[in-house]
Amino acid sequence: MNYLPCELCWYQPILMYPLVVVLGVAAYEGNTSVWKSGLPLSVLRLGVAGSHTFIQVAPDAVSSTCTVGGCTGVVWRGLGLFTIPRLSLTAFELVAAGLVVARADRR
């Protein structure tokens, strides 16, 4: 769609791809102890998505160091609430919650 991604938009998929492999292999093998490796990856991603969302919400509160695109820019808005970083944050909150549930079920 010809969106110019900012630096934080680049980091988020980089942290997502290993999680896809880890969770995919665990699902295939039926491994419920995947939370040990999946939860740290999710928490890292939550940190990046959370900081990106905060930068968009309060651009004057933080000095953005983006050199590509603009971390404060909103290029898409869905339902009047969601932006791309907020969708990312929501997705990884759900993944982290699912891994916490997997941990609880294992006990």
Image: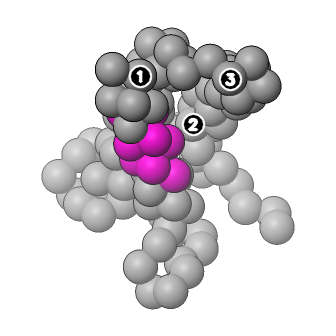
Question: Which residue reaches farthest right?
Answer: 1
Furthest toward the left, the residue is 61
- Residue 9 horizontal side relative to residue 36, left or right: right
Residue 90 appears in which quarter of the rendering? bottom left
Q: Which residues are magenta?
A: 91-100
Name the kind of residue labelled 1 in the image. Answer: Arg
Q: Do the residues under discs 3 and 1 have CB atoms within 8 angstroms?
A: no
Q: Quadrant of residue 86?
A: bottom left
Vertical position of residue 19 compared to residue 63: above or below = above
Q: Secondary structure at mark 3?
A: loop
**Given this view, does label 2 or label 3 mark the residue nearer the observer?**
3
Task: Give how far apart the Cα atoms at labels 2 and 3 are.
Answer: 27 Å
Residue position marked by numbered label 2 in the rendering:
12
User: Residue at image x 59%, y 70%?
Assistant: 75
The quarter of the picture where the C terminus appears is top left
Residue at the extreme bottom of the image, as rendered: 80
Residue 30's label in the rendered image is 3
Mark 2 and mark 1 lie on one chain; the one further toward the N terminus is 2
Say which of 62 and 97 sits in front.
97
How crowded pointer 2 is (Cα within 10 Å; few <14, some 14-19, many 20+) is rated as many
Total labels: the figure holds: 3
Would you say the magenta stretch is mainly helix, strand or loop?
helix
Alpha carbon of mark 3 to alpha carbon of mark 1: how far? 12 Å
Secondary structure at badge 1 equals helix
Residue where numbered disc 1 is placed: 106
In front here: 40 or 56? 40
Q: Amino acid at mark 3?
A: Gly
Local packing at callout 3 (Cα closer than 10 Å; few below 14, some 14-19, many 20+) is few
